[in-house]
Amino acid sequence: VSLTYDLTDNLFSVENNSIKADAIGNETSTINVNYGVGACRCSKEAFACISGPSNPSPVLTQNELIYICLSPNDESKDDVDISNFKMNFVQNERVVYRAAEIGSRGDPTEGSLSQISSLEQTYKVTSRVVTAIFEGGPSFDVTGMAYLEFKSRRLLASVGKEGLRGIQGLDTSKTEAPFSLNLEIKKTKEKAGNDVARGNLSVTLTAAVAAVVLALVFVIRKKLG
C-alpha cells in the first residue's frame, strides 16, 4: 500500500492563539543600619584599648603623653573603615586643643602637639595635653567626628550584586560617626607645689607692700605732727 502526497499544494494555519505576559515581580527592601566608631585610651606599644566599661581609664597626669585609639565598633568593622576624622580636646564646653583635623587629601591632619599612626582598622593619636587643661578642672572630653567608608567588595560578596541594587537606604559611599571620651586629669606634685609657692610668694609680697604703706603713713604723720 502506498500513499502519495503533493507537499507543494498544502496550506495550514494556527488561529485563535493569544499570549499573556506574566507580571514582573517588584520587591523593595529597606535596611536601616547604624555604623559607629569607638574611642579609648591605648598605650604607646599597642593599638589595643587599656580602658573600657569594666576597666575605667587611668587618671592622666601632667607632662604625660596621651594615646587615643579610634576604630570601627564591633557592629561596623566588617563593613566599614575609617577614612578621615577630626579630634578635639574640650573642657567646659570650649575647644582647648585640636588634636586632629579633617585632611584634604583623604587622611587626617595632625595637630601641632600630636602624631597620628595607624594599624589595620585602628588609628592612634599620640598627643601632649596643653597646660590650660590642667588649670580648667578635674577632667576633659575627647570628642570628634569620623568619616566611614564602606568596603564595597565585601558588601557585594555578602549581599550579592543584584541584591545590592534592590537595597534602599544604604549609602555605599561614606557616612559620619561621632565619638566622645571623658578623661580624668591630675596635676603633678611638682606643679601643685609650684602653685603653693606662688601663692605664698603673693602673700609675702602683699604683706611687704602693706608694711611699706604703714611705714610711709607713720613718717608722714610724724612730720605733720
Image (cartoon, rainbow, N blue to C red):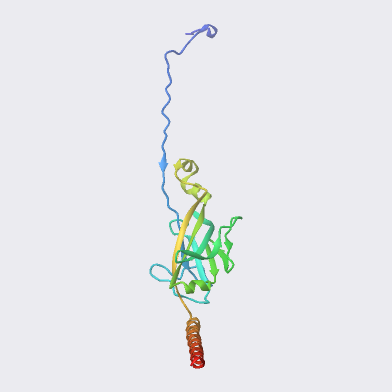
The number of callouts visible is 0
Residue 121 in view, yes or no? no
Tell me the residue at 54%/69% (across/down): 126
Looking at the picture, how far across and down is residue 224, in whole percent?
Answer: 50, 91
Most extreme residue toward the left is: 54
Q: Nearer the viewer, residue 143 or 17?
A: 143
Most extreme residue toward the front is: 225
Q: Nearer the viewer, residue 138 or 64?
A: 138
Tell me the residue at 41%/48% (across/down): 32
Q: Nearer the viewer, residue 35 or 155?
A: 35
Q: Is residue 81 above or below residue 133?
A: above
Tell me the residue at 41%/37% (across/down): 27
Q: Is residue 119 above or below residue 166?
A: below
Looking at the picture, how far across and down is residue 119, in whole percent?
Answer: 55, 64
Q: Is residue 112 above or below residue 63?
A: above
Looking at the picture, how far across and down is residue 80, in whole percent?
Answer: 50, 54
Looking at the picture, how far across and down is residue 20, in whole percent?
Answer: 42, 22
Residue 115 in view, yes or no? yes
